[in-house]
Image (tube, rainbow, N blue to C red):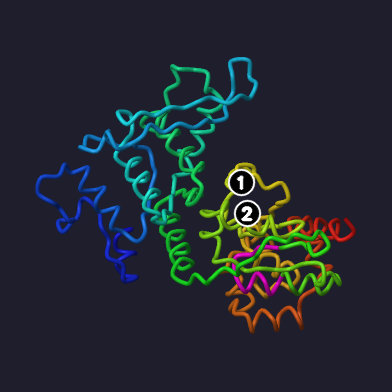
Amino acid sequence: MTVNVLEKRGHQVLFHENPTFPARVGLHSHDQCLEAVANSDLVICLIDKRYGGKYAGARSETIAAQKFSVHGDSKSGKKKSFDVVMHVSSLSITWIELITAHKKGIPVITFARQRTLDEKETRRRNQFLSSFKPAYAERNELFDLIDWVTKQKVNNWIASFHSMMDFDHKLNSWLDEIEHQRAVPKVGKVDSPEKAVICILVEGESDRLFISFILRKLNLSSQFVIIPTRGKYYLLNNFKVVVAQYSYAFRRVIVVLDSDAETEIELEQSKHRLQLLIDDSGARNVDFFFAHPVIEAWIAAGLDPAEGKHPHEVVTKQVFSRLFGDASINHVTELLAQHFSYNKAMASSSDFRKFVDHILSLKDR
């Protein structure tokens, strides 16, 4: 199914099971996979329950041991840092393919089944137990691979999925974003504190439009700069690089993203992973907010519900289009100008209210 999705979008897909997979005489099959990765424009990593076979190619001497730390619980229940050292003899071919992609600077999108991510958290709560055996995942090293991904300087976000249909939807969304990336404005370091303002990073133009509308409503436009990035994929996977330039240039940075979460548990885990990215970046002036599930839900919170709308219906992008029309910039501009109620949105959406309260708290600092 994944291959069909990619090929329908015009991409040439390299995967080992394909009869046309490029093979070179004299190379181990694992090293042929590494060659294919090195010649790719994008790598998609899909993590489910299997860790994968151990690397058995001829490049072991060129691959360094992977050393990093994970946060887990000690026997007493206290949080502590555990050092992880993975020698090449313990690395799966999947892991080494990812190492190859990162060394070559090839973009990576990583997806992981939610059940595996949940079990990783269980493992970390029992990190002190050397005898821990996962119920779903093949082995504990799979959890180390997941944490290794999150510790990379770029391409370190993991998108969760519950089912293959959910994965298919999220893959298409991320590919849409990648294929329509725009250049990120360059920002130089601000030397004078008097020049510093507050920067809000958003995914794209529609998000910028709505946040700008709210700031004008609150008479705060002069204190904030809103910058659309290349999208959620680019921002999350290059967090240290992208956010760092803005954290140097502005007094405060606020990151606003769609949560795209289907459950409250998934939302909380996304918040946790994003907070880890911020902590790891070293930036101390960065806050974040997730519009749940999408920023269109914040807009819909201030609009009169369309006839036939279920009172508890979650407003996704598709639901918004059905209820209020397409989310094009021109149409959203018209909705905001003629039909949007700020007071209604504040009363209807708790996460929108928290965002507004936060920016109001910054205006006099």
Quadrant of the rendered structure where residue 106 is?
A: bottom left
Kind of residue at badge 1: Ser
Residue 204, magenta (yes or no): yes
Residue at 57%, 68% in the rendered image: 184
Tell which of 300 and 223 is nearer to you: 223
Disc 2 versus disc 1: distance between alpha carbons? 7 Å
| Pointer 2 local density, CA inside 10 Å: few below 14, some 14–19, many at least 20 | some
Tell which of 291 and 273 is nearer to you: 273
Give coordinates of residue 271: x percent, y percent.
63, 47
Residue at 64%, 84% in the rendered image: 330
Give coordinates of residue 130: x percent, y percent.
45, 17
> What label does residue 244 carry, if any?
2
Task: Check the image and report above or below for 328 versus 348.
Answer: below
Residue 293, magenta (yes or no): no
In the picture as drawn, the residue positioned furthest to the front comes out as 191
Quarter occupied by the C terminus: bottom right
Tell me which segment is drawn in magenta: 200-210
Residue at 83%, 62% in the rendered image: 194
Kind of residue at badge 2: Ala
Residue at 67%, 57% in the rendered image: 255
**Disc 1 designates what residue?**
281
Horizontally, residue 218 falls left or right of residue 139, namely right
Quarter occupied by the N terminus: bottom left
Give coordinates of residue 305: x percent, y percent.
71, 72
Tell which of 70 and 117 is nearer to you: 70
In the picture as drawn, the residue positioned furthest to the right comes out as 364
Horizontally, residue 145 falls left or right of residue 349, namely left
Which sits earlier in the primary sequence, circle 2 or circle 1? Answer: 2
Element under disc 1: helix
Check if mark 2's residue and mark 1's residue have beta carbons within 8 Å: yes
Element under disc 2: helix
Quadrant of the rendered structure where residue 213 is?
A: bottom right
